[in-house]
């Protein structure tokens, strides 16, 4: 099914000419880290992108990007709306726009961590909502995004959302019950990796390397290590064995980390991220929702 036919079928509210236009139209509310990464990638892929951010400094006029007056103006102009504000900003945004969303019936795609589709559906009856968990590698077209649909969204909506997120990397359909778990692995994942990189970097500086050399060394080591394994179907544990000689240097470090329980700590950290994602779903701005 083509994008145009998908749109026509599921978005009867919007005038036919919008869909016949070779530019597909999408709106993004919140043009911060993720919103701008998505907006720029979608623009590159031939979409007409409408944007709004309450922080006007984030809004810069570009070809094929339209700055809307406010979120209401954006919803009126966009058959598909990506919500890319922080989880705690979702409730006020919904309160302000729910009547208009009911009337215009756009497909809503939320990327907010820990905010379930039912949270939206409880506020806007019959809302077609898709929930996505991308990551910040979207900025380089290398996000891994997990996509899930709400009760009223159709499978065509899900397919459309999946296609939208292929503009910023790979996208996979997943049951919503796994989204908070994906948040704790791939959503927060870049942060964990940078944390480990920072640990290696500060260790290199401690050993006497100049900061710029230490930084390059760490980045190139990560890139090399990832490139080495990315197309292979070998378990991580086998790779660890391949690079760890008995009685060698790697074994000295890994042995100490194992003994000190680093793996257990990492699992606990991931569990904390998962609990936090579930908690975000229960409390919004201090009110139980
Ligand atoms: N960053 C990541 O790595 C990542 C990964 C996966 C998912 N996510 C999800 O993506 C969402 C956005 O994260 P982010 O890092 O891009 O946040 P961000 O950089 O803070 O961008 C959010 C932007 O939305 C604006 N905003 C807040 N309420 C608004 C409203 N009612 N109307 C219009 N704009 C509004 C904010 O303005 P103010 O600053 O003035 O409030 C801010 O400029 C979050 O829900 C997060 O859970 C993020």
Image: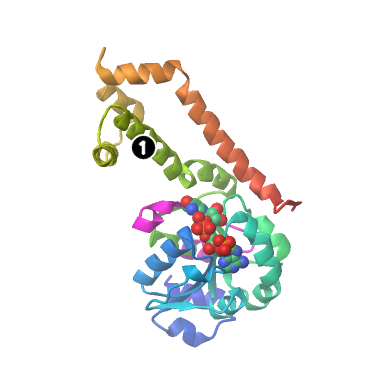
Q: Rate crowding at label 1 as few (under 14), some (14 to 19) or many (20 or more) other CA atoms within 10 Å.
A: some
Residue under the image location 54 percent in, 80 percent down = 77
Report whether 114 appears left or right of 42.
Answer: right
How far from the left and from the top, in percent, is residue 289? 74, 53
Question: Which region of the structure is painted magenta?
Answer: 135-160
The reply, left or right, for residue 76 in relation to residue 141 is right
Q: Position of residue 159 (x, y in %)?
A: 47, 62
Residue at the right extreme, as displayed = 288
Q: Is 158 part of what is drawn in magenta?
A: yes
- SS for callout 1: helix
- Looking at the image, can residue 10 be seen? yes
Residue picked out by circle 1: 197
> Measured along the vertical axis of the image, is residue 253 above or below residue 283?
above
Q: Quadrant of residue 81?
A: bottom right
The structure residue drawn at horizontal position 63% and vertical position 53%, both measured from the top left corner, is: 116
In which quadrant is the N terminus drawn? bottom left
Q: Residue at x 25, y 32 (%)?
A: 209
The vertical placement of 161 against 196, above or below, is: below
Location of residue 229 by image quarter: top left
Left or right: where 174 falls relative to 37:
right
Q: Which one is nearer the viewer's eye here, 134 or 223?
A: 223
**Magenta includes 223?**
no
In terms of depth relative to the viewer, which is nearer, 179 or 284?
284
Q: Residue at x 37, y 16 (%)?
A: 255
């Amino acid at each position: 099914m083509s994008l145009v036919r998908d749109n026509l079928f599921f978005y009867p509210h919007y005038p036919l000419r919008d869909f016949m236009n070779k530019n597909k139209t999408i709106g993004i509310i919140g043009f911060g880290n993720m919103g701008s990464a998505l907006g720029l990638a979608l623009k590159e892929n031939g979409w007409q992108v409408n944007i709004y951010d309450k922080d006007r400094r984030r809004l810069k006029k570009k070809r094929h990007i339209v700055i809307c007056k406010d979120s209401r103006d954006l919803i009126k102009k966009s058959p598909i709306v990506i919500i890319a504000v922080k989880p705690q900003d979702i409730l006020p945004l919904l309160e302000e726009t729910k009547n208009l969303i009911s009337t215009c019936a756009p497909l809503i795609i939320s990327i907010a961590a820990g905010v379930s589709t039912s949270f939206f559906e409880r506020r806007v009856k019959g809302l077609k909502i898709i929930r996505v968990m991308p990551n910040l590698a979207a900025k380089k077209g290398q996000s891994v995004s997990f996509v899930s649909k709400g009760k009223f969204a159709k499978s065509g909506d899900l397919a459309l959302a999946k296609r939208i997120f292929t503009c910023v990397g790979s996208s996979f359909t997943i049951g919503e019950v796994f989204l908070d778990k994906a948040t704790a692995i791939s959503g927060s994942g870049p942060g964990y990796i940078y944390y480990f990189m920072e640990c290696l970097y500060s260790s290199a500086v401690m050993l006497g390397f100049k900061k710029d050399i230490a930084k390059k060394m760490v980045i190139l080591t990560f890139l090399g290590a990832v490139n080495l394994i990315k197309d292979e179907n070998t378990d991580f544990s086998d790779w660890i064995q391949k690079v760890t000689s008995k009685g060698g240097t790697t074994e000295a470090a890994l042995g100490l980390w194992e003994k000190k329980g680093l793996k257990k700590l990492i699992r606990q950290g991931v569990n904390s991220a998962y609990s936090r994602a579930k908690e975000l779903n229960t409390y919004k701005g201090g009110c139980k929702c």
